[in-house]
């Protein structure tokens, strides 16, 4: 292979990072850099950052050993998470897993506290081989796949719901944990039950919101339209694909 310099094992950040900072990193496609996967002809007219696996048999002869650039947020990701541990809090409260099904850029990170006793059935059963709206993973996978049709538009809709639902979880975290601490002082089991109910409520809320988002995206972007209006394609892309070239050749 190519002789490349290895990445360092660790890098000290310029500032203390939050859970939200790490989530932003997980959702990255190198946007704003020279490696931006939402730019260029490979991203298509609507800036899709996903690059599907390409077998050697279809690659150009002089590029058989080359690969697509790999994003941090991979479309085929099964799940991702950020683990948050706070030693100054009781264990059932201090440990929380911010868990997201499917691709990071289109998922919702849900708080699952480390000692909860159960999760919704939609998170513990189901198959990825059969489409099933009772299986949580499919809500996020469907939205992610549908967004590929008009990524630069739909990712903004997705971000809006992420801000509402996921942002709401972060906004509630302090109050929820304060209440859990008070319950823990009286009876640790009560705190665990409280957090179990809270995590399950968050999970169900996120899944329901993503199925609602799926329905909205289907209707809003039906047949290539945006809310019933034609947006066509970016001018740069029309030029790249020689828009109108056949008609012009007939006029010559």
Image (cartoon, rainbow, N blue to C red):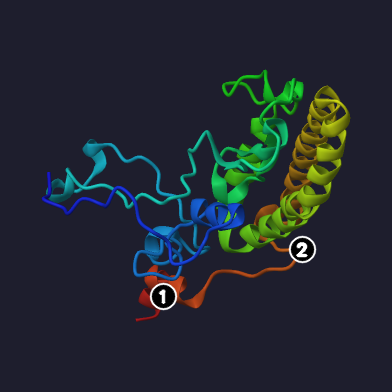
Mark nearer the N terminus (2 vs 1):
2
Residue drawn at x 42%, y 66% is 39
In front of the other: 51 or 15: 15
Residue 128 position, x and y percent, is 58, 24
Which numbered disc covers residue 135? none
Circle 2: element type: loop
For residue 95, above or below residue 122: below
For residue 68, above or below residue 37: above
Residue 169 position, x and y percent, is 76, 49
Residue under numbered circle 2: 227
Q: Is residue 66 left or right of residue 115?
A: left
Q: Residue furthest bottom?
A: 252
In front of the other: 193 or 213: 193
- Other residues around mark 2 within 10 Å, as few (<14) / some (14–19) / many (≥20): few
Residue 68 position, x and y percent, is 31, 50
Which numbered disc covers residue 239? 1
Q: How far, Cα to Cα, is label 2 from label 1?
A: 26 Å
In front of the other: 226 or 197: 197
Q: Is residue 67 left or right of residue 156?
A: left
């Amino acid at each position: 292979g190519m002789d490349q310099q290895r990445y360092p094992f660790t890098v000290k950040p310029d500032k203390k990072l939050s859970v939200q900072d790490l989530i932003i990193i997980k959702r990255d496609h190198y946007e704003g850099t020279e490696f931006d996967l939402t730019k260029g002809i490979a991203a298509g007219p609507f800036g899709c950052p996903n690059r599907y696996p390409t077998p050697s048999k279809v690659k150009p002869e002089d590029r058989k050993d080359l690969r697509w650039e790999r994003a941090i947020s991979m479309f085929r990701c099964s799940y991702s998470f950020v683990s948050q541990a706070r030693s100054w809090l009781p264990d059932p409260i201090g440990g929380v897993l911010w868990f997201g099904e499917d691709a990071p850029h289109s998922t919702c990170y849900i708080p699952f506290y480390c000692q909860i006793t159960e999760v919704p059935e939609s998170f513990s059963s189901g198959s990825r081989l059969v489409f099933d709206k009772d299986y949580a993973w499919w809500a996020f996978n469907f939205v992610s796949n549908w967004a590929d049709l008009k990524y630069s538009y739909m990712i903004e809709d997705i971000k809006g719901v992420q801000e509402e639902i996921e942002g709401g979880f972060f906004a509630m975290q302090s109050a929820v944990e304060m209440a859990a601490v008070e319950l823990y002082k009286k009876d640790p089991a009560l705190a665990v039950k409280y957090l179990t109910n809270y995590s399950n409520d968050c999970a169900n809320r996120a899944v329901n919101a993503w199925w609602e988002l799926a329905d909205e995206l289907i209707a809003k972007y039906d047949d290539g339209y945006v809310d019933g209006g034609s947006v066509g394609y970016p001018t740069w892309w029309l030029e790249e694909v020689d828009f109108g070239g056949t008609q012009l050749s007939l006029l010559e």
